[in-house]
Image (spheres, rainbow, N blue to C red):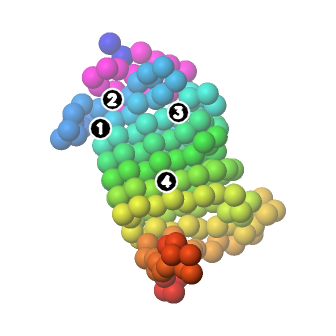
């Protein structure tokens, strides 16, 4: 039986938000300890106002979903998803993307780290203060871009976005001590 939790959508073991069945299972939206488990959602928008700063979110096998996370969270993991858009305030530890395609992440405040593994078409939108501190780690991924807002006034009419690619091609060489040194390709 579904239950209401704060301002979050209905929760259930077998069904929840999203009316269409995903090929890999029934839609699911539930709290398991301190982790919100969201899976098999399709073509929906989820406003996660009930998530607190002591909780994490795991999103699995979702397609064409928009997530709004207005409060700071511990972490966000997105796995095997397509067409996911995330509007988030901030994360304490970071974000993990695995086997995803077409992901857009907009961060209002701070995201300390983003790990990207086996993903394509990933875009980030962050502020200039966050650009100085964020660490991107990627593996077997391509078409990754970061958009940085150089506007520090807070006035949206003065937004000044620049886009930079996250390198996916590298050059490695031995140094005089026979250690490998790697840097982004000259293409970047």
Q: Which mark is residue 28?
A: 2
Q: Earlier in the sequence, mark 2 or mark 1?
A: 2
Badge nearest the viewer, 2 or 4: 4
What crowding class fits label 3: few (fewer than 14 Cα within 10 Å), some (14-19), or many (20 or more)? Answer: many
- What residue is shown at x 46% (from left), y 67% (from top)? 144
CA separation, marks 3 and 2? Answer: 16 Å
Q: Which mark is residue 115?
A: 4
- What residue is shown at x 71% (from left), y 63% (from top)? 132
CA separation, marks 2 and 1? Answer: 6 Å
Give how far across and how far down residue 8 sits, in percent.
50, 27
Q: Earlier in the sequence, mark 3 or mark 1?
A: 1
Q: Earlier in the sequence, mark 3 or mark 2?
A: 2
Badge nearest the viewer, 4 or 1: 4
Secondary element under disc 4, as helix, strand or loop, is strand
Secondary element under disc 1, as helix, strand or loop, is loop
Which quadrant does the N terminus fall into? top left
CA separation, marks 4 and 1? Answer: 22 Å
Q: Nearer the viewer, residue 81 or 188?
A: 188
Q: Earlier in the sequence, mark 2 or mark 4?
A: 2
Q: Nearer the viewer, residue 156 or 139?
A: 139
Which residue, given by chain and number where applicable, does mark 3 sit on? 56
């Amino acid at each position: 039986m579904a239950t209401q939790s704060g301002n979050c959508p209905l929760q259930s073991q077998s069904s929840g938000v999203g009316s269409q069945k995903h090929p890999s299972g029934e839609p699911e939206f539930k709290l398991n300890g301190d982790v919100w488990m969201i899976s098999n959602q399709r073509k929906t928008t989820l406003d996660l106002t009930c998530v607190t700063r002591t909780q994490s979110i795991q999103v699995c096998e979702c397609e064409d979903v928009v997530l709004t996370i207005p409060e700071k969270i511990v972490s966000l993991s997105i796995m095997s998803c397509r067409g996911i858009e995330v509007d988030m305030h901030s994360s304490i530890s970071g974000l993990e993307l695995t086997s995803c395609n077409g992901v857009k992440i907009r961060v209002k405040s701070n995201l300390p780290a983003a790990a990207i593994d086996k993903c394509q078409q990933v875009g980030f939108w962050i502020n200039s203060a966050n650009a100085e501190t964020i660490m991107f780690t990627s593996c077997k991924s391509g078409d990754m871009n970061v958009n940085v807002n150089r506007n520090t006034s807070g006035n949206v009419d003065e937004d000044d976005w620049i886009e930079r690619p996250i390198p996916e091609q590298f050059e490695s060489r031995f140094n005089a001590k026979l250690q490998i040194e790697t840097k982004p390709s000259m293409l970047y």
